[in-house]
Amino acid sequence: MTASVALPLVDLFAPATETVNAWRGRCLASFARAEAAISVALVTLGGPVPLLVGQRQAALATRLRGRSDALDACAALDAFGVHDPLRRFLCHGDSRVTLDRRGRWQASFTLLVPERDGVGRRFLLIDEAEATALASALARDRQRLVCALERLGPFSSGCATPPLRTG
């Protein structure tokens, strides 16, 4: 005679999804800190502050180029700009979490992009090890950028900042 034993179902997806979302949040926080430092630097340098983040990075690069004291900041801005494709997926992409047989997660991000003939899709597939490496590189490059801007003047949120209007 065989006895049937009910095994409790373990929900592995919920903790994996929470881990992916926590990683995504840490990365977005790095982007937000860098973007705030870039915006404050633009305000401090005077002139218009563009609406879009990529335009702000380009405007800051233009304003810093040619300044002998801004070589580190220009290099840091370029290094941070390498992460922009990741920012697009994390900010605007839809994500799905899958697990392999060992319970390790993978996240797939789908990004809708305008194209001539309608809307296209771009995909990013990332696993735990890649995610950890990307978050570390992003944090490193963000810190390098913020520090380089701080050395140039009171640009970051850690320094005296010019008054910003809200609303």
Image (cartoon, rainbow, N blue to C red):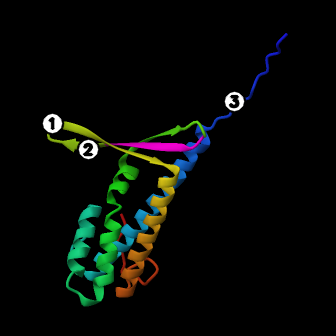
The numbered mark, 1 or 3, whose residue comes first in the sequence reads 3
Q: Quadrant of residue 82?
A: bottom left
- The foreground one among 17 and 79 is 79
**Which label was assigned to residue 9?**
3
Measured from the top left, where is residue 14 in percent x and y? Answer: 60, 40
**Which label was assigned to residue 26?**
none
The numbered mark, 3 or 2, whose residue comes first in the sequence reads 3
- The foreground one among 12 and 130 is 130
Question: Relative to 119, is 133 above or below?
Answer: below
Query: What is the secondary structure assignment of the residue under circle 1?
Result: loop
At label 1, the amino acid type is: Asp
Which label sits in the foreground, 1 or 3? 3
Q: Residue lying furthest top in this view?
A: 1
Q: Is residue 57 left or right of residue 141?
A: left
Measured from the top left, where is residue 103 in percent x and y? Answer: 60, 40
**Which label was assigned to residue 117?**
1
Write down the residue under mark 2.
113
